[in-house]
Image (cartoon, helix red, strand yellow):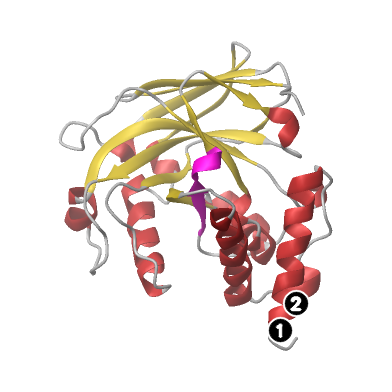
């Protein structure tokens, strides 16, 4: 397949935006861009630019596909990343409008908030850890604008790494006393435990995931900056959610984070 043209990229952006706006899933964008990863990130960036032009602001990034099992499922050997915008962010214990999503799922993660830019490599463990202001428990709600989660690597990248919403907990921990790799996680849905895991589930160490993101973001000309939030990847299985559900995740050393899912007025 030849490299997609600018008009083809715009068609992919429009397809994903229409799905998000109508709540009706679209056909895979791989029909338009094939397996071209550069094109997939170009589609992602065009979609983000449109949302920023519409009033959203950039708050950070998210790392996806940090699980080896999920990577094997999609036939890849590396994660992907997306962008976090202000219209995606919710406070702990917030009510989230589930009817504005298509096929949402929730996962528990460690989020890092940066106090320094990660704009000059090499990104070794000390450099990356030194750029973190604090860690916090997080819920990420992933969603696919592509119907039935019928996605390949290129599809999910183009679809902003399947990002939808996220929630940050209240408790903060510096890395002087918190070791992300050994943290344990338990997530409950309506009071029943549905997902467990450890920090090591995210590329062996959430800080390794952060280092990967710093490297790829710099290579793409958009390095991580002080103040950004980084969702570092799921610590356990992802769980579908719907209206009326309540989710609580507890991460050792970081406390808990909670969200409820409601039908919001249209």
Looking at the rendered structure, the secondary structure element under dot 1 is loop
User: Is residue 239 magenta-colored?
Assistant: no
Compare residues 182 and 159 and report the one nearer the observer. 159
Where residue 50 sits: x, y (%)?
A: 61, 60
Where residue 101 sits: x, y (%)?
A: 72, 37
Magenta segment's dominant SS is: strand
* Label placed on residue 8: 2
Split into 4 quadrants, where in the image is the C terminus?
Answer: top right
Compare residues 236 and 150 and report the one nearer the observer. 150
Q: CA distance from mark 2 to mark 1?
A: 5 Å
* Residue name at image x 71 percent, y 23 percent: 264
Residue interval drawn in magenta: 80-88
**Do the residues under discs 2 and 1 have CB atoms within 8 angstroms?**
yes
Compare residues 117 and 142 and report the one nearer the observer. 117
Q: Examine the image and state in which quarter residue 198 appears.
A: top left
Q: Most extreme residue toward the bottom, as rendered?
A: 2
Q: Most extreme residue toward the top, as rendered?
A: 191
* Label placed on residue 127: none
Label 2 environment density (alpha carbons within 10 Å; few <14, some 14–19, many ≥20): some
Q: Is residue 86 above or below residue 10?
A: above
Tell me: 16 left or right of 168: right
* Residue name at image x 68 percent, y 86 percent: 3
* Residue name at image x 39 percent, y 47 percent: 230
Label 1 environment density (alpha carbons within 10 Å; few <14, some 14–19, many ≥20): few
Tell me: 22 left or right of 205: right
Where residue 223 sits: x, y (%)?
A: 34, 64
* Label placed on residue 5: 1
Residue 34: in sight, yes or no? no
């Amino acid at each position: 397949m030849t490299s997609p043209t600018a008009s083809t990229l715009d068609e992919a952006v429009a397809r994903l935006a229409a799905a998000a706006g109508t709540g009706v899933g679209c056909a895979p964008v791989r029909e338009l861009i094939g397996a071209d990863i550069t094109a997939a990130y170009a589609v992602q960036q065009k979609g983000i630019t449109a949302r920023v032009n519409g009033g959203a602001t950039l708050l950070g990034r998210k790392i996806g596909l940090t699980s080896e099992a999920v990577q094997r499922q999609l036939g890849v050997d590396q994660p992907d990343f997306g962008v976090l915008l202000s219209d995606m962010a919710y406070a702990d214990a917030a009510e989230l409008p589930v009817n504005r999503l298509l096929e949402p799922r929730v996962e528990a993660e460690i989020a890092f908030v940066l106090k320094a830019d990660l704009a000059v490599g090499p990104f070794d463990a000390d450099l990356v850890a030194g750029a973190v202001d604090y860690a916090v428990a997080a819920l990420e709600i992933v969603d696919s604008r592509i119907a039935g989660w019928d996605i390949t690597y290129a599809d999910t990248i183009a679809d902003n790494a399947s990002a939808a919403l996220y929630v940050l907990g209240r408790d903060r921990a510096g890395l002087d006393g918190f070791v992300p790799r050994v943290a344990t996680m338990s997530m409950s849905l309506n009071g029943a435990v549905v997902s467990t895991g450890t920090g090591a589930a995210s590329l062996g160490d959430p800080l390794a995931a952060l280092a990967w993101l710093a490297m790829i973001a710099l290579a793409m000309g958009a390095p991580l900056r002080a103040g950004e939030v980084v969702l570092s990847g799921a610590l356990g299985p992802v769980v579908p959610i719907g209206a009326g559900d309540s989710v609580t995740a507890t991460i050792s050393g970081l406390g808990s984070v909670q969200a409820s899912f409601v039908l919001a007025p249209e």
